[in-house]
Amino acid sequence: MPNVHPTEELLNDYAAGSLSEGVSLAIATHIAMCPQCQAHVQQLEAIGGAMVMSAVETPVGDHVLENVLAQMSHLESKPTSQPVLPGDLRNQDIILPNPLRDYLGAKTLRELDYLNWTTLPGYSEYVASDRSDKTKVRLLRVAAGMTLPQHTHEGLELTLILKGSFSDHNGTCGVGDLSVADPATDHAPSVDRTGECICLAVTDAPLRLTGRFGRMLNPFLDL
């Protein structure tokens, strides 16, 4: 089961429907792989629905929230369906979680090979969406043992692992984990030496290289 999860704020905003398309995709894909977050979001959505009904049926009083929470106390914190988890990592026919499958039009990890990847030594990137609002949705394939250039962020970066593992400011992240970085984060994620890492990466603002040589490259890069 995943060990690194979205922040409480991101889950609340997801349940309220206030996130951008790309960020929502990352959260939805993690939820499809994580029973804990799936149950939490279901409870948030149910509470929100009950509050709407309460506002329609009765005048709003000082204790509306307490009443709604009391009404919700019978709900169990369990997902209504079994999360879609990637299977044996040696099997390239691993089924992708539903939200990502629908977004990419690819059903399995093997089918990702047919996407239009840009490839550099040890690193490949597929840009699934690059919107005018600066939100960028990408797939990354990084070779075993490779460390990405040190960088920080002008906004949010959400990285969801589909295969393999890497280490960053959140520690070691494995399949289903969602690493969240913000402008306070300056990191250089390093892929485990046991195999390549495939990730969904969503940014809502450009990255900025911070290493000794990376800073000189920033004016020439579209990150």
Image: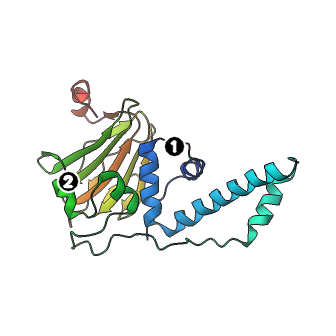
Element under label 2?
A: loop
The residue that label 2 is drawn on is 146
- Give the image quarter of residue 21: top left
- Identified by mark 1, the residue type is Leu
Location of the N terminus by quadrant is: bottom left
Q: Vertically, is 160 above or below 110?
A: above
Q: CA distance from mark 2 to mark 1?
A: 32 Å
Query: Residue 19 — which label?
Result: 1
- Identified by mark 2, the residue type is Met
Q: Residues within 10 Å of mark 1 (few under 14, many from 20)?
A: some
Comparing 80 with 192, the one in front is: 80
Q: Nearer the viewer, mark 2 or mark 1?
A: 1
- Residue 114 pos. (x, y %): 16, 54
Element under label 1?
A: loop
Question: Is residue 86 shown left or right of residue 193?
Answer: right
Comparing 97 with 212, the one in front is: 97
Verify CB contact (< 8 Å) between mark 2 and mark 1.
no
- Residue 5 pos. (x, y %): 48, 58
